[in-house]
Image (tube, rainbow, N blue to C red):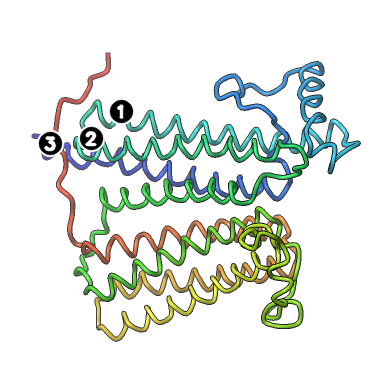
Amino acid sequence: MPQANATPRRRFVSVWLVVTIALVALMVVVGGATRLTGSGLSITEWRPVTGAIPPIGEAAWAEEFAKYRASPQYKLLNEGMSLGDFQFIYWWEWGHRQLGRLIGLVFAGGLLFAAVTRRVSLGEGLTLFAMGLLLATQGAIGWIMVASGLQPGMTAVAPIKLTLHLGFALLFFGTLVAFLIHVRPPRSGSPRLSGPLRAGAYLVLALTFIQILLGGLVAGSRAGLTFNTWPLMDGGFAPSIDGLFAVTPWWENFVDNVALVQLNHRIGAYVLLIALVLYAFAVMRAGVDRATRRRVFELLGVMILQAGLGVATLVMVVPLSLGLAHQFGAVVALALAIRNVALASRGAGQRVREPAPGPVAQPA
């Protein structure tokens, strides 16, 4: 009977989305490691297909190393680097790009299979296709980002382009999480929240997204390597106005001035935590169900841990392990904020209608 196949047919979509979400989360962490190890400019060409094959043999490595030695980063920052040191940063960037290729293949292959076997409706298929275009755009922005670091006088990628690259990755990640909740919402039902509480959920999500982007600017400008004290910064709440706006034109300070970039990230954390605490109190006062309270306090707990990680990363001058843990914590916090919005807006007890069952391809 058609209904008997509904759950197994839909289970593939759930598993496929979970796998893709995990890969994208890993990609954000690997991208962070690529940045922290200074590896992002080690591959100076964008070859979407042939670039999947790494250098094989001494001659191939010598050729690849020669391309890097012609780059501004080598001449200004890494002159005299050994081949072994180059191979270390090369493998980080190569792994980053390979993971990007894997995500593209997994997403495209899963979408094609789900569409052909009618595991998604037409509307869902079109939505997923649009998500695929978002993923492709994110990859193209990645190369634009790398190209910015290969310009004369540059030793790293432009912070604003790194943040744009991160932002599109998070947008794709967010759509995956939201679609997974659409396909498989929790079984325990909870009512749709009131308008003010829904607005609060959206505000927390927006502040979370903005805060992660501010963190991208910190990573792009290496602002975490300075002002390594907390809660004071340069002996006070903030450095002097002259220090915060030392770059001209004035607007470039928000991207390139490490003092203002770090201060904005700190303020963003304070605003987000205050907003989330107020939202949690509002949820408690509203007398909502236990499931809603639990997911809000899970988000609050993760956000507090994430703030603690951020402080530890700063005062310890950004060790690789803490830096990556902080980035992963940001991804987890974003996922929980998206889940809170999705369930607050629809009610966790509503289950979506499955697409009309169709013929399942039989093995040859």
Left or right of 22, for residue 241: right
The amino acid type found where label 2 is placed reads: Arg
Distance between the Cα atoms at labels 1 and 3? Answer: 16 Å
Compare marks 1 and 3 and give the one earlier in the sequence. Answer: 1
**What label sits on residue 356 in the rendered view?**
3
**Number of numbered discs overlaid on the protein picture:** 3
Residue pictured at 33% horizontal, 73% vertical: 200
Evaluate if marks 1 and 2 touch, with contact meaning CB atoms under 8 Å apart: yes
Q: Is residue 237 above or below residue 92?
A: below
Distance between the Cα atoms at labels 1 and 2? Answer: 8 Å
Q: Which residue is mark 1?
A: 113
The image quarter containing residue 222 is bottom right
Element type where label 2 sits in the image: loop
Looking at the picture, tell me which residue is in the foreground, 148 or 227. Answer: 148
Element type where label 3 sits in the image: loop
Residue 362 x/y as whole percent: 23, 20
Looking at the picture, tell me which residue is in the foreground, 50 or 223. Answer: 223
Residue 245 x/y as whole percent: 69, 68
Element type where label 1 sits in the image: helix
The amino acid type found where label 1 is placed reads: Phe
Q: Tell me the quarter of the image containing the C terminus.
A: top left
Residue 23 x/y as whole percent: 49, 42
Evaluate if marks 3 and 2 touch, with contact meaning CB atoms under 8 Å apart: no
Q: Which residue is mark 2?
A: 119
Looking at the picture, tell me which residue is in the foreground, 258 or 59. Answer: 258
Residue 315 x/y as whole percent: 73, 70
Distance between the Cα atoms at labels 3 and 2? Answer: 8 Å
